[in-house]
Image: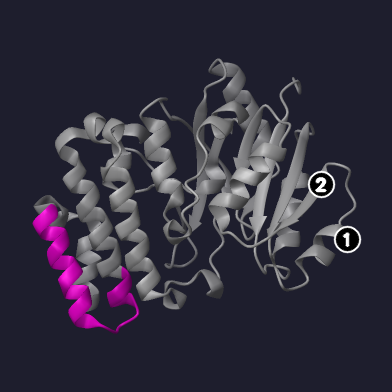
Amino acid sequence: MNDSIKYSIIIPSYNRGGMIAKTIHSALNQHYKNLEVIVVDDGSKDNTEDVVRAIKDERLFYYKKNNEERGVARNYGALKATGDYVNFLDSDDIVYPNHLEEANKFILKNESPAIFYQGVEIPASNNGFKIQTEFKHGINEDLIYGNPLLIMGIFMKRSIAIENPFNEERILSASEDWELWLRIGVKHPIAYNDVVTSGFIQHDERSVLTFNIEHLIKSKEALLRIVLSNKEIVNKYKGRTKAFIGSNYSYVALHLVLVKKNRLLAIKYAFKSIVAYPSGLFTRRFLAIIKHML
């Protein structure tokens, strides 16, 4: 196996002492060995530090900083990284033992792409089946209609990560990754490796039932402001930015109906979505909105 390429797996964490060990062990337990795992503790108040320091592996590095949200923590980790490529995990994600091995094969076969996405399994609600992301027109073209990319599937050259940091506006939290993919996608094609090497783990703390409505709305408003003021993104997608607006409004509407409260606000955002992008009425998300409203 050609192991000349080094990988930096960066894991920001906040109060995930009960989950992060499993994530770290999955990152360290790779068939491909030339790696480092960087945990950036974003001001945790629980036992996260004790849990991480109890894992004895010379490839594991722990840094603690003041709480500033994930975007800042990820950027901090990228600056500490020494790998050729970086891969970001949340502190409750799981990567399989073939994660870096398959990434390495793809990189060697495709002449070291600047950024690419690798297959992620998403547990479905129906009998535990898995859903694999597909792209109709390629990742770059599909991005304006919604964010189909889960963070653990993204690999990028460390130089690209340094040149294109996550936006650090705190209010953008939970939307900062989509903004970055759009920004990078203007400059680089995002390749796709369809081999599944990681899993998105659903749990109560990740449930849509626990989100803050006010933060969700402000986060989406910030995302719209930042993206639509970026001339490169607007020029690339031209008239299709209306789909981006509609997608953000429908996202808010769906989450509001899922928590089964504030029905009038859900209707307001569903209407705003239709006005911005009438074709969105025929998407799977909008059908879900209608289903949960009835």
In the image, 75 versus 93, the foreground residue is 75
Q: Mark 1 points at which residue?
A: 54
Q: Is there any visible trace of residue 144 in the rendered image?
A: yes
Specify the amino acid type for callout 2: Leu
The residue under the point 52% across, 24% down is 114
- The total of numbered circles placed on residues is 2
Residue 281: x percent and y percent?
13, 58
Check whether the beta carbons of the residues at disc 1 and disc 2 lie within 8 A of each other. Answer: no
**Element assignment for label 1:** loop
Specify start and end residues of the magenta stretch as a single range.
255-276
Magenta highlight on residue 222: no
Asked if residue 98 can be seen in this view, the reply is: no
User: Tag 2's secondary structure?
Assistant: strand
Mark 1 surroundings within 10 Å by alpha-carbon count, few (fewer than 14), some (14 through 19), many (20 or more):
few
Residue 201 located left or right of residue 65 = left
Q: Quadrant of residue 94?
A: bottom right
196 in relation to 127, above or below:
above
| Main secondary structure found in the magenta portion | helix
Please tell me which residue lies in front, 236 or 43.
43
Residue under the image location 50 percent in, 64 percent down: 128
Mark seen at residue 60: 2
Does the magenta run of residues contain 260? yes
From the image, which quarter does the N terminus lie in?
top right
Residue in the image at 20% along x and 42% along y? 241
212 lies above or below 147: below
Q: Please, is residue 149 above or below residue 172 in the view?
A: above
Quadrant in the rendering for residue 287: bottom left
